[in-house]
Image (tube, rainbow, N blue to C red):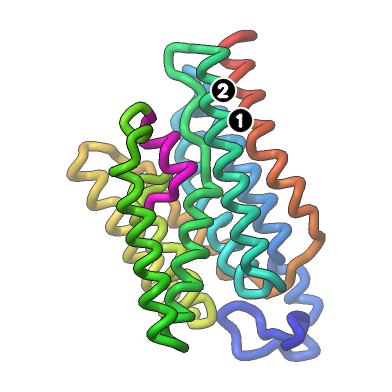
Amino acid sequence: MDRGKIPAFGRLGVHKNDNHRSEVSHMNTFKIKIIALILMVIDHIGYYFEGTPIWFRWLGRASFPLFLFCMVWGYQYTKNRRIYLFRLYLMSVFMTIFGYAVDYFMPTEYGYGNHNIFLTMFIVGVLISTIEIFLRDHKKGWILLGCIFAVQFLFYILPFSRNLSGDVLTGIIPNIYLNEYGFEFVALGVLMYFLKEKKDCFIVMYIIFCINQFSMEMLDGIYGLQCLMVLALPIMLKYNNQKGPGMKYFFYIFYPAHTFLLFYLANFVF
């Protein structure tokens, strides 16, 4: 199917006289990624620099859901899913080694932090493919599910695993539960993929997820953090199913570069 002819997200079609309005009011993948990137930088400024207004962290809650949203649409259209997943896994390993090296050579009170959204996205992609294969071929699906289970099992029995933290180990041996955003956001990514063309269901699912986050925060005594990811929903609903400019490697490079820069400035300059 020609991507340029796919109806806008959540719409049945775009009339010719609506083209200009659509270009103005809707966003492609690139624009959404830029918004997510800006929110991510604001969030990480709040993470690294003491005394930063709390609303920096609040705004940052919308960043990862937007990246996850772009990932599931990108996964839909990518020409080679194996290469896509391999690239995510390599970035996960890189961020794991990079973070470990930073903490080893530049030790600080709070450390560099666990920054590895690539791992969560990798697991989401693997589960999406597994579910789709299972729906087409139960035998192959069960084999893949067995492989996923085996990897989770290896996470706990390998001898060297006792000497590594969960954050380091799961970056190499992907774990559905132990990743930066946890199982809940892995499930969110999978649901986003299968509901992405069903606007009403997508909205209901996402709002329920945010309400669940709010309820958990209330029980834990944390007020108004991750549940503010609801701010990302209006942006998602403006998606027009267009890719926009590529620059995919820019985002891969920017992620470790900006976290290290902020870490260095906060701990060794200011």
Most extreme residue toward the top is 269
Q: Is residue 171 magenta?
A: yes
Q: Which residue type does callout 1 highlight?
A: Thr
Rendered view: 50 above or below 83: above
**Earlier-in-chain disc, 1 versus 2:** 2
- Identified at 34% across, 49% down, the residue is 154
Instruction: Tell me which corner region of the image, top left, top right, bottom left or bottom right, holds residue 2.
Output: bottom right
Q: Quadrant of the N terminus?
A: bottom right
Q: Quadrant of the C terminus?
A: top right
The magenta-colored residue range is: 164-175
Q: Position of residue 146 (x, y in %)?
A: 35, 68
Label drawn at residue 259: 1
Disc number lying in front (1 or 2): 2
Label drawn at residue 94: none
- Identified at 69% across, 63% down, the residue is 29
Image position of 59 (left or right of 13): left
Q: Is residue 1 visible?
A: yes
Q: Residues within 10 Å of mark 1 (few under 14, many from 20)?
A: many
Secondary element at tag 1 = helix
Q: Position of residue 80 (x, y in %)?
A: 69, 70
Rendered view: 122 above or below 159: below
- Identified at 65% across, 61% down, the residue is 84
Secondary element at tag 2 = helix
Image position of 185 (left or right of 90): left
Most extreme residue toward the left is 219
Most extreme residue toward the front is 159
- Identified at 52% across, 16% down, the residue is 104
Rendered view: 245 above or below 131: above
Q: Is residue 200 visible?
A: no
